[in-house]
Amino acid sequence: MTTDRATGSSGTGEAPVGRDAVVSAVLTHAAELFAERGPAATSIRDIAERAGVNHGLVFRHFGAKDQLVARVLDHLAAESGAALDRSGPGDRSPLDAALRMHLTVLARSILDGYPVAQLQRDFPVISRLIERARPFHESEHDASLAVAHVAALSLGWQLFGSFLQGAAGLEDMSEAELQRDIDAEAARILLSDPADPFPPAE
């Protein structure tokens, strides 16, 4: 009888033991490595070593690399959804951190040629934004398109913010000022009907 017991050490304390602990460790450390170097440059052995588990356990619980990438993307999507629930009007730091990790792994996976739209099964943040946008748009298509534009805006600033600030001469803007402007533009896109983008003030 075999058990899910690590044979190495991740350097973070005791090695994970048991299915749930192993799966959690692999997802967490795979996400970190994918964010750092992309999935194409990360081997199963790299992930196993970082997580402190036998690489055979990674194959047992996740299968091939594509399946692991898919599980990591769904894991990060769930983390982003949970962070959205925890974030309030005065504190968006949990959401920012979760989205930064998720968007970075998404971008690296796309650059590595992974079909992320097919691999990731759940999109909780996108789904909730579409729900919020529906009352302000004439059709489901328009609401979905608005959310896609907002996601592209967020993805661009998350990944290329420092370049965009320098290229556009916006270095004098603080991070808080820039985020307020990004949020305002996202709200304008999300909550405006494209047929009447500038409704009269009440």
Image (cartoon, helix red, strand yellow):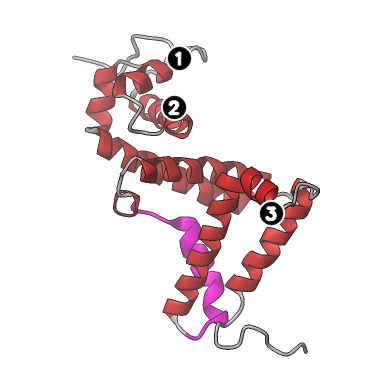
> Magenta part mainly helix, strand or loop?
helix
* Amino acid type, residue under disc 2 in the picture: His
Q: Which residue is mark 3?
A: 168
Q: Indicate the quadrant where residue 144 lies.
A: bottom left
> Which secondary structure lies at badge 1?
loop
User: Label 1 is placed on what type of residue?
Assistant: Ser
In the picture provided, is 99 more to the left or to the right than 180? left
Of the numbered discs 2 and 3, the one sitting upstream in the chain is 2
Q: CA distance from mark 2 to mark 3?
A: 36 Å
Instruction: Name the residue nearer the viewer: 2 or 8.
Output: 8
Q: CA distance from mark 3 to mark 1?
A: 42 Å
The residue lying at 46 percent from left, 47 percent from top is 78
**Residue at label 1?**
10
Instruction: Establish if 158 lies above or below 140.
Output: above
When asked about the image quadrant of residue 75, the answer is top left
Q: Is residue 9 left or right of residue 101?
A: left
Asked if the residue at tag 3 contacts the one at tag 2, i.e. Cβ–Cβ closer than 8 Å, the answer is no
- Marking on residue 76: none
Counting residues from the start of the chain, the first of labels 1 and 2 encountered is 1
Circle 2 — which element?
Answer: helix
* Cβ–Cβ under 8 Å for marks 1 and 2: yes
Q: Which residues are magenta?
A: 120-138
Q: Position of residue 116 (x, y in %)?
A: 34, 49
Residue at x 51% of width, y 51% of height: 81
- In x, y percent, where is residue 188? 65, 72
Where the N terminus falls, by quadrant? top left
Q: Position of residue 90 (x, y in %)?
A: 76, 53
